[in-house]
Amino acid sequence: MSFGNKTIGRVIVTLLVGDTAMAQKLLNHLRVHRRRSAFSQKELAFLLGYRSGSVVPRFEQQKRRITLGLAVSYQLIFGTELKETFPALYERVEQRLSWRMQELYERLNKSVPSKKTTLKLQILRDALTRVPKPPAEQEV
């Protein structure tokens, strides 16, 4: 049986939150921001470069994938951080990246020291201070 990323994301959020309705709300806050700003779907679609307002609810309901350009557009229009507008996506990327950075750091730390390795280790150390620890390493 195959599930899409959208379904898996909802299942994970549902498991974490325990409520399907709340899980849907946590995936993105596009509708909330649009309604607070008083933009119609047609006006927001125009700002995003679309002719029809019908595309906006598709983004809001996760029926259409958000591109990086659209995410940045939403950020600029509403003055919000990506983490605030797309919390589920941001957390998923953050967790995966954190795990991979930690893994690479451990591999490089075991290798023969060189100028390049030392630079990479420093960059990874700095980056790891900006993201939470991978779930396997978080204390309970």
Image (cartoon, helix red, strand yellow):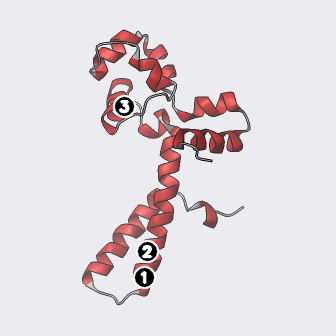
What is the CA distance from the residue labelled 3 to the residue labelled 2? Answer: 32 Å
Name the residue carrying label 2. Answer: 105
User: For the residue marked with disc 3, what is the amino acid?
Assistant: Gln
**Which residue is at a point 44% across and 66% down the rendered structure image?**
101
Residue 34 visible? The answer is yes
**19 with respect to 32 (left or right):** right
Q: Amino acid at mark 2?
A: Tyr
Q: CA distance from mark 3 to mark 1?
A: 37 Å
Disc 1 element:
helix
Instruction: Choose between 63 and 33: the one closer to the eye.
Output: 63
The residue under the point 62% across, 67% down is 137
Q: Are marks 3 and 2 in contact (CB under 8 Å)?
A: no
Whole-percent x, y for residue 140 in the image: 72, 61
In this figure, which residue is indicated by the disc labeled 3?
75
Left or right of 34: which side holds 19?
right
For label 3, the SS is helix
Residue 33 makes an appearance in the image: no
Identity of the residue furthest to the bottom in this view: 112
Residue pointed to by mark 1? 109
In the rendered structure, which disc, 3 or 2, sits on the residue that comes first in sequence? 3
Please, is residue 39 above or below residue 109 in the view?
Answer: above
The percent position of residue 127, horizontal first and vertical second, equals 40, 62
Residue at horizontal 43 percent and vertical 10 percent from the top: 38
Mark 2 and mark 1 residues within 8 Å of each other at the beta carbon? yes
Task: Report the disc number at residue 24.
Answer: none
